[in-house]
Image (cartoon, rainbow, N blue to C red):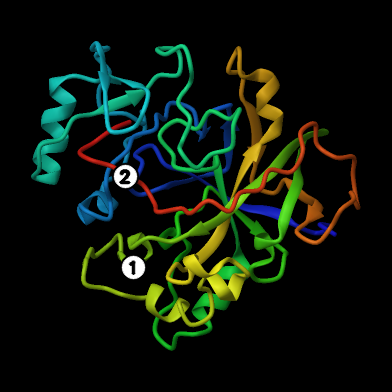
Amino acid sequence: MGTGYTIAEIVVYPVKGCRGVSVPSAAISFTEINAPGMKALNVPLRKCPSTGKARQGERGHIVDVGMPTLKGVYEGQGVDEGPEAAAWFTQYLDIPARLVRFDPTATKENRQAEDAPEGYVTGFVNTGQFLFASEASLDKVNSYFTTAPFPMNRFRPNIVVRGPPSFEEDKWRQFTIEHMGTHLNFSYVMNRGMCKVPTINQDKPDLENVEPNKTMFTFRSGPHVGLEFEKVKKVYFGSYFVCDSTISTASNSKPHVIDVGDNLNVITTKHDDVSVNHASPKSGSLESNMDLCGPRPVELMY
């Protein structure tokens, strides 16, 4: 079923809500996808579109001063990175902001996103650990427009897949990514309901834009993707997944690695009851019909 599918792009987000960084290789830990030297941050892009223009330097962070823990809008704890970082972001965003790093060792129970399945640590993200989307899905969206095509960065996936038909990722329930003889197992969480962020041009921010969301509502709303009536007002692109293979390494946080060009093999889909290509992952398929309202950020966290 998944023969010929490959990883076309890997994108990490050192600043949650800021511009992503395309990398040839990335580590997948039990909390996130990352690249060497990069840390995860959280900035409200949909409220502060200028953050979409912010880029990370080669070191991947602004400052790390190890301040005491701080309780934020997300349940769980973070580490305040101090006044220098706060001043930098406050000046850049022109709003009061603080820089907060997610620290999974600071609490007895690692933070669980409210829409994420039990047993998976998710850092500051909302739902599943990783957002997957296919190149064909983007091509399909762009086929509805006569203007310049929308880039994939509007939709902010972690992993872009080459090979499957458009929106086939909606149906995946379990798949593996093969890297140097090892197989990482992934399970479905939910379809990704879009907020306003895809309407923001990261090179020229404008909160008045309504596309591609407005047009996508005519072919990618809840009923179009088989979701219940209360989700009719949402538009969907990509799907969230968790990596089952990270559960066994959660205690020591040892990351797995994936590269651009790695093979992706689908095991089960929405309408399958049995495996078709490989043995099933260690844990079963994870499905959820919970609503995704997008991030609830205030100020600045990482």
- Amino acid of disc 2: Arg
Residue at position x 58%, y 26% in the image: 30
Residue positioned most to the bottom: 146
Left or right of 285: which side holds 49?
left
- Position of the N terminus, as image quadrant, is bottom right
- Dot 2 corresponds to which residue? 296
**Rendering coords of residue 143 (x, y %):** 53, 83
Identify whether 71 is placed above or below 241: above
Residue at position x 58%, y 18% in the image: 253
Residue at position x 34%, y 60% in the image: 197
User: Considering the numbered disc 2 on the image, is that residue within a helix, a strand or a loop?
Assistant: loop
- Amino acid of disc 1: Thr
- Dot 1 corresponds to which residue? 199
Quadrant of the rendered image containing residue 25: top right
Residue positioned most to the front: 229
Quadrant of the rendered image containing residue 89: top left
Left or right of 99: which side holds 218?
right
**Rendering coords of residue 172 (x, y %):** 72, 56
Quadrant of the rendered image containing residue 150: bottom left
Identify whether 56 is placed above or below 68: below
